[in-house]
Image (cartoon, rainbow, N blue to C red):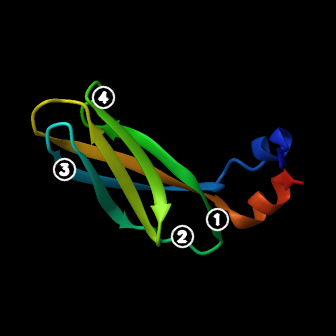
Amino acid sequence: MKINPALIENKVTDVFKIKKYSKSITVSANGMTTVNMGTLSVPSGYTFVGILSYENGYGDQWVVSYCRYSGNVQATVHSKYNASLTNSLTCYVLYIKTDVYNTILTT
C-alpha cells in the first residue's frame, strides 16, 4: 500500500481520533505479565490504525509491547530487574476516518 501525503494534508480536521488507556501494574522479579488495558471500541465511521506506546513504567528495566487481541488492548511486560516493580503503563489507540482511509490508501 502507498499513502498519498497530499490527501492527508488536505484533510487534517477531524481525521483522527485517539483513546487513552492506563493501568498500574506489578511485575515480579525477572518476570513477565500480560495486562488487559481495556476493551477496544472503534468509533462509528472510523478504522483502527494502531497502538502508540506512551508511558512504560521503568524504561530501563521493562520491555513493553502492545497489541490488539480478542477485542481488547493488551500489554505484555518483561521485567529485567531482580526485584518486583510497580508502575503505570499508558498507551493511545489511533483511529482514522474510514472514508479518508479508503481515499488515501492505494494498492
Of the residues shown, which amino acid type is indicated by label 3? Ile
- Mark 2 vs 1: CB contact within 8 A: yes
The reply, left or right, for residue 73 in relation to residue 86 is right
Q: Position of residue 49 (x, y in %)?
A: 61, 55
Instruction: Say which residue appears at 35% left-offset and 65% top-offset.
Output: 38
The residue mark sitting in front, 1 or 3, is 3
Can you identify the residue that label 1 sits on?
47
Of the residues shown, which amino acid type is indicated by label 2? Val
Between marks 2 and 1, how big is the CA–CA gap?
7 Å
Q: Position of residue 3 (x, y in %)?
A: 81, 45
Quarter occupied by residue 5? top right
Depth check, front residue: 13 or 53: 53
- Mark 1 vs 3: CB contact within 8 A: no
Depth check, front residue: 45 or 53: 53
Can you identify the residue that label 3 sits on?
25
For label 4, the crowd category at 10 Å Cα-Cα, with few meaning under 14, some 14 to 19 and many 20 or more, is: few
For label 3, the crowd category at 10 Å Cα-Cα, with few meaning under 14, some 14 to 19 and many 20 or more, is: some
Q: Position of residue 69 (x, y in %)?
A: 47, 65
Query: Judging from the image, what secondary structure is the residue with disc 2 in?
Result: loop
**Disc nearer the start of the sequence (2/1):** 2
**Disc nearer the start of the sequence (4/2):** 2
Of the residues shown, which amino acid type is indicated by label 4? Gly
Q: Quadrant of the C terminus?
A: bottom right
